[in-house]
Structures are given as C-alpha cells and as structure tokens.
Image: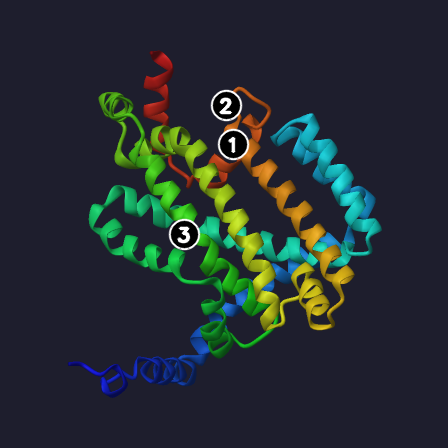
C-alpha cells in the first residue's frame, strides 16, 4: 500500500520561488515601467482629492450620488462622509478612495477592450477565460507575495494588486453584454451599411452598457475588499487603520476603521448600482453618453450609418 509519509512530493513551491526570483532579477525594468503609470495616476488623484476642502468634496460626492442613483442615496452619502470626517479618518478615507479610483481607471482602460476582444473572437475568449477563472478563485492574500517580490511594498504595489484582483468581473461582463445584444439589432445595423467598427460603437456598446456597468459595480466592490487586504504590504488608507488596531489589540481603533470601510463601500456600491440600473432616459443619460464618447475613437465613416439611421 502507498505510504503518504514516503510518497514523493513535487517541489512545486521551490520551482515557483525560483521562477519569481528569476523574473524579479531579469525583468525589473519591465515591472518598474508597469509601476510608473500607476504611481503617476495614483499620486495625481490622491493630491487632487486632498487639495479639495472636505465640505466641498462631500457636496460633490452627494451630487454625484443624487444624479447617478437617488435623493436617498445622496442623503446617505452626505451623512456617511460627514461621519467619516468627524471620526478623524477623512485623510485615510481619501487615500483609500484614491487607491480604488486608480484601480477602476486602469481596469476600465484594460478590461473593456479585453472584454470586447473576447466577445468578437471566440478563440480569444477560450484563452482568456481560464486565466480569469484562476484570477477570481485565487485567494486574495496569494496576490501579495509575487507583488511584493516584483514591485516592492507600499501603496503603489498595493494598487497593482488591487487592479489584478478586480479586473476580472469587468472583462467577463463586457464580454457577456456584447454577446447578449439582440442579433436582430446587429443585422439591422448591417442592413444600413454599418461596418463592424460602427456596429460596435453605435449598436453593441450602447446596448451592452447596462451590463458593463454591472461589471463595473462588481469591480468596485472587489477593489474595495482588496484595498483593505493590501494594507498588509504597506498600502496606506483605512485598511492600515484596521491592521494597526488588530496589531495593538485596540478594538475601538479597528472597529472605527471597519465602520468607515463599510460606509465607503456602501456609497460606492449604491452609486455604481444606480449607474447600471437607470434607463437611458434617466438622470445618468449624460454620464452614459460621456462614457460612450470617451471610449469611442474618431470615426469619420460613422456619418453614413448615422444618416441612414436617422432617415428611418
């Protein structure tokens, strides 16, 4: 019979250790190049938010909540952010928000194009899907070890870890949203002479936008969770407050940090849910149009398709 004590064990952990060290040694310039735009964006957002007086910033967030969700969400946002400020955690909350905002921007820039590619090419989806499965099922703490070895410690490497952990839902929902677009709508666009590029920007993306925004909501929540975990590698923010409270056995400090995290997560969740749930005729119409214009490249050929569409 087989004896587990004498069974040969594959030294997979040693192979991974050697592989990561080899990457860190030979590809350090590449990882520093990846780190630089994230650091630049994070610094710009963090300095910009900290430069705005907190009463004005609270009002801005309340207005965004009202326009994207409802008056009740706006009131909740106003009261929650005011409570965070009076708990003495405003600076930490803004740092966490900057970390999440940086991750969201990068996830949108990378995730939506990858999702579009997967929706248009089944072979690409066949390759990307197992990678997303691994990324979403890997425990969050596992991301920290390679990130530390490849990027170092601190808030910027923490932002990289947040991006890697949070990008998967946006890719999946973008792919799903485009695939769920009614084929009759696509055929109607082709009947008017639209090219594949015009179909994407004029038909598929507008119809898939609610699903994509649902993916954005999941990305925001995963980024919020990961922003707390990356405090273990030196990332600043509310997660560090909780970590310090646990290290000192200070229940009050940890609880206050946890309350602030919950409030901030609820605010972000309600705002992104509002964006996903509102109809095009609702108050987020302008935001959706702005997002579509932001993602849409210059296309001179669209005129003929739009003219034919208007004639109908």
Q: Which mark is residue 168?
A: 3
Give the number of callouts: 3
On the image, the x and y values in percent for residue 300 come to 37, 34
Asked if residue 185 lies left or right of residue 169, the reply is left
Residue 57 visible, this orientation = no
Q: Secondary structure at mark 1?
A: helix
Mark 2 touching mark 1, by CB under 8 A? yes
Residue drawn at x 70%, y 26% is 71
Inter-mark Cα distance, 2 to 1: 8 Å
Residue 76 in sight from this viewpoint: yes
The residue drawn where x is 54% and y is 54% is 223
Q: Is residue 271 above or below residue 263?
A: above
Q: Between residues 215 and 140, which one lies in front from this camera angle?
A: 140
How many other residues sit within 10 Å of disc 1, few (<14), some (14-19) or many (≥20)? many
Q: Earlier in the sequence, mark 3 or mark 1?
A: 3
Q: Earlier in the sequence, mark 3 or mark 2?
A: 3
Instruction: Work out which quarter of the rendered image holds the N terminus and state it.
Output: bottom left
Q: Going 63% across and 72% down the picture, which residue do you hit?
A: 234
Residue 292 is left or right of residue 309, and the answer is right
x and y, in percent, of residue 81 in the image: 75, 44
The residue wearing badge 2 is: 280
| Coordinates of residue 7 in the picture (x, y in percent) | 23, 84
Q: Mark 1 highlights which residue?
A: 288
Mark 3 Cα shell of 10 Å, populated few (<14), some (14-19), many (≥20): many
Rendered-image quadrant of the C terminus: top left
């Amino acid at each position: 019979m087989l004896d587990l004590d004498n069974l040969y064990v594959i030294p997979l952990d040693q192979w991974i250790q050697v592989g990561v060290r080899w990457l860190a040694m030979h590809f350090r310039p590449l990882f520093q190049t990846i780190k630089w735009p994230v650091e630049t964006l994070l610094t710009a957002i963090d300095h910009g938010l900290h430069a705005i007086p907190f009463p004005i910033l609270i009002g801005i967030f309340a207005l965004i909540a009202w326009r994207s969700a409802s008056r009740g969400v706006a009131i909740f946002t106003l009261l929650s952010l005011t409570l965070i400020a009076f708990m003495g955690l405003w600076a930490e909350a803004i740092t966490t928000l900057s970390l999440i905002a940086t991750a969201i921007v990068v996830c949108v820039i990378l995730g939506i194009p990858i999702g579009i590619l997967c929706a248009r090419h089944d072979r690409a989806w066949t390759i990307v899907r197992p990678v997303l499965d691994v990324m979403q099922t890997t425990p969050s703490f596992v991301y920290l070890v390679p990130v530390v070895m490849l990027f170092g410690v601190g808030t910027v490497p923490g932002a990289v870890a947040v991006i890697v952990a949070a990008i998967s839902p946006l890719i999946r929902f973008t792919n799903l949203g485009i695939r769920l677009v009614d084929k009759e709508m696509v055929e109607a666009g082709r009947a008017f002479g639209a090219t594949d590029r015009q179909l994407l920007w004029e038909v598929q993306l507008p119809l898939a936008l609610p699903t994509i925004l649902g993916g954005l909501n999941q990305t925001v929540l995963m980024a919020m969770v990961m922003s707390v975990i990356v405090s273990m590698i030196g990332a600043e923010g509310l997660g560090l407050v909780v970590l310090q409270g646990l290290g000192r056995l200070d229940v009050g400090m940890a609880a206050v940090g946890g309350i602030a995290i919950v409030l901030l997560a609820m605010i972000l969740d309600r705002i992104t849910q509002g964006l996903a749930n509102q109809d095009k005729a609702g108050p987020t119409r302008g935001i959706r149009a702005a997002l579509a214009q932001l993602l849409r490249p210059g296309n001179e050929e669209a005129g003929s398709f739009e003219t034919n569409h208007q004639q109908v």
